[in-house]
């Protein structure tokens, strides 16, 4: 009998097919309408630095309904702030989190523009040691999910590391349940090829408790990591509750294992506005809607032309949803 792990292992070893557009393909309509198109705020950090309130108003005018925040935040542990600083400097950012506002002020701005924030990205250390502060801010902002964008490289050098981090996810998820949150893990493209005969991402999926740990799929990074988003959605129905949507100008893969920012940042130029690249986003979203994804965020990291990206991508994501 073919197990789920064998199925994914086989799929990960062959070129991507179903998740890519083909010249003769017809547009695919999703079976479940995306009622609230969202935005990962790493798409527009510079706009947020210039005018946070104005940026939120602009999103609402276009039609976006949800946003996902990224840290560090005022209550983040010093180690998280220190690790972020060189990355921020390299890409020209000076702020993150609430951009000088309090959680209450951010919530007021969201409310004024008809926006909600179901989720936030944060670091492991803050979740482990400052969960009360995280819970208090999240309650103010209305977050349902909080989690990490990537596992620190030093915590995933071998399969035993992955086993330990999966157990850590369960522990954090159990603690977060007490403050009304669910832990999310964002796939960033590493851990999708065999390590010691096992695919690490599958190990995390199989070892974590679905009641405590949910997954956020990033279709661009998963593709760059040599995996098929549709295969994972079908093999693990109900595990992926959130999704980052960005397109590819052409099919690209990590040169290495995709395990650190030095491999992520060089692929930024290969990101495209939703619907403008080679990924079969309509097909992916159709399967995502049917397998349990509830929050769909456009995310084109550090969009060079924010207005174009926001408008064109929203128009596309709206157009592939069927009319009522």
Image (cartoon, rainbow, N blue to C red):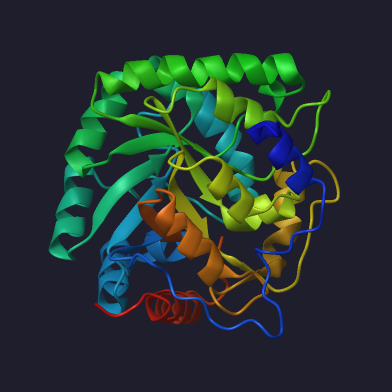
Q: Residue at image x 19%, y 58%? A: 109
Q: Splitting the image into 4 quarters, where does residue 76 fall?
A: top left
Quadrant of the frame with the N terminus: top right
Quadrant of the frame with the C terminus: bottom left
Instruction: Specify whether 126 is left or right of 269.
Output: left
The answer to whether residue 151 is above or below residue 216 is: above
Q: Splitting the image into 4 quarters, where does residue 119 fall?
A: top left
x, y percent for residue 300 = 54, 64
x, y percent for residue 246 = 56, 64
Instruction: Specify whether 212 is left or right of 236.
Output: left
The answer to whether residue 273 is above or below residue 297 is: below
Q: Splitting the image into 4 quarters, where does residue 173 fall?
A: top left
* Residue 87 visible in the picture: yes
x, y percent for residue 28 = 51, 76
Q: Residue at image x 56%, y 60%? A: 301
x, y percent for residue 296 = 41, 58
Q: Residue at image x 59%, y 56%? A: 219
């Amino acid at each position: 009998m073919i197990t789920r792990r064998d199925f994914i292992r086989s799929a990960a070893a062959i070129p991507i097919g179903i998740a890519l557009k083909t010249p003769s393909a017809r547009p695919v309509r999703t079976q479940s309408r995306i009622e609230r198109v969202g935005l990962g705020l790493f798409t527009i950090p510079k706009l947020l630095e210039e005018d946070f309130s104005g940026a939120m108003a602009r999103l609402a005018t276009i039609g976006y309904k949800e946003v996902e925040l990224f840290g560090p935040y005022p209550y983040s542990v010093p180690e998280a702030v220190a690790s972020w600083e060189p990355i921020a400097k390299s890409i020209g950012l000076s702020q993150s989190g609430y951009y000088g506002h309090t959680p209450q002020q951010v919530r007021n701005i969201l409310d004024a523009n008809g926006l909600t924030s179901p989720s936030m990205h944060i670091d492991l250390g803050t979740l482990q040691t400052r969960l009360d502060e995280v819970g208090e801010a999240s309650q103010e902002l209305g977050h349902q999910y909080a989690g990490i964008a990537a596992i620190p490289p030093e915590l995933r050098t071998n399969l035993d590391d992955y086993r330990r981090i999966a157990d850590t996810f369960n522990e954090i998820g159990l603690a977060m349940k007490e403050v009304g949150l669910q832990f999310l893990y964002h796939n960033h493209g590493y851990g999708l090829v065999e390590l010691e005969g096992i695919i690490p991402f599958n190990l995390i999926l199989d070892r974590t408790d679905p009641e405590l740990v949910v997954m956020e799929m990033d279709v661009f990074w998963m593709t760059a990591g040599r995996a098929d988003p549709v295969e994972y959605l079908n093999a693990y129905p109900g595990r992926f509750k959130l999704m980052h949507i960005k397109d590819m100008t052409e099919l690209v893969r990590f040169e290495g294992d995709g395990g650190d920012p030095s491999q992520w940042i060089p692929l930024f130029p290969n990101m495209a506005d939703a619907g403008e690249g080679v990924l079969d986003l309509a097909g992916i979203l159709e399967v995502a809607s049917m397998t349990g994804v509830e929050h769909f965020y456009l995310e084109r990291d550090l969009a060079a032309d924010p207005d174009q990206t926001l408008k064109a991508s929203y128009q596309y994501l709206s157009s592939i949803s069927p009319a009522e």
